[in-house]
Image (cartoon, rainbow, N blue to C red):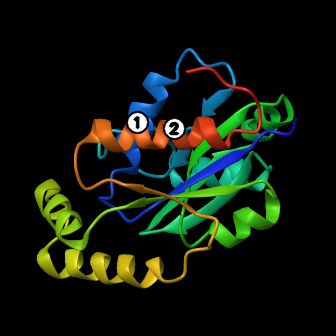
Amino acid sequence: MKSRLFYVIGGSGSGKDSLMCYARKRLSNNPNVAFAHRYITRPANICGENHIALSHEEFEARRTIGLFSMHWQSHCHSYGIGIEIDYWLSKGMNVVVNGSREYLNNARQKYSGLLPVHIVVSSDALRARLLARGRENHAEVDARIDRHLQFIGQLPGDCIEIKNNDSLADAGEQFIRAILKKSRRKTCA
């Protein structure tokens, strides 16, 4: 049976990285689910995401020779998903990637079995998280929230929604259940 690509999206501060880390740990003994790293032109010590940090030159060199299955630009950084996911999918593994809301339509064109997973968080919780991390001022946080609200109305109907307003464990278990239920190959928890 063909595998499935889970494409995780959500606004900055929605908890994508925390949920993916939680699910990766809980599913580490499951040989049918793989979590891909992103390649980003951002130092690894800035955020909680477990990504591969590349210089702009390294990123462009890899992009030029075709080492990314998907790539995009956002907030002055380049983001890429490596071609290793194509191999994993061809071997029947279900793959989870941290995607981009703006790149979703491009990703769907390339991966017909793609299933978007939207991490949903209330505007109040999002505002509190963004202010607490201290990377943006109030005006920048407000702009992120406006962008978040605009995008919600454009989501496709087949999107899985994971509510992440409360505890990480609650949202994490909901995320894991969705992955296991929607996987196209028998998986074990």
Q: Quadrant of residue 4?
A: top right
The kind of residue tagged 1 is Glu
How crowded is the residue under tag 2: few (<14 C-alpha within 10 Å), some, or many (20+)? some
Name above or below for residue 157 compared with residue 183: below
Secondary structure at badge 1 equals: helix
Disc tally is 2
Identify the residue at horizontal 75%, vertical 45% (top origin).
67
Q: Which residue is mark 1?
A: 173
Identify the residue at horizontal 76%, vertical 55% (top origin).
64
Q: Quadrant of the N terminus?
A: top right
Horizontal placement of 154 versus 50: left or right?
right
The kind of residue tagged 2 is Arg
Identify the residue at horizontal 76%, vertical 39% (top origin).
184
Name above or below for residue 151 compared with residue 124: below
Q: Position of residue 29 (x, y in %)?
A: 56, 14
Name above or below for residue 146 compared with residue 100: below
Q: From this viewpoint, is residue 139 visible?
A: yes
Q: Which residue is mark 2?
A: 177
**What is the CA distance from the residue labelled 2 to the residue labelled 1?**
6 Å
Q: Are marks 2 and 1 in contact (CB under 8 Å)?
A: yes
Identify the residue at horizontal 32%, vertical 53% (top origin).
164
Q: Position of residue 31 (x, y in %)?
A: 67, 19
Name above or below for residue 80 compared with residue 131: above
**Pick the front one: 177 or 34:** 177
Q: Quadrant of the C terminus?
A: top right
Horizontal placement of 15 versus 96: left or right?
left
How crowded is the residue under tag 1: few (<14 C-alpha within 10 Å), some, or many (20+)? some
Q: Position of residue 155 (x, y in %)?
A: 55, 75
In the current view of this chain or complex, which residue is farthest to the top? 29
Horizontal placement of 116 versus 93: left or right?
left
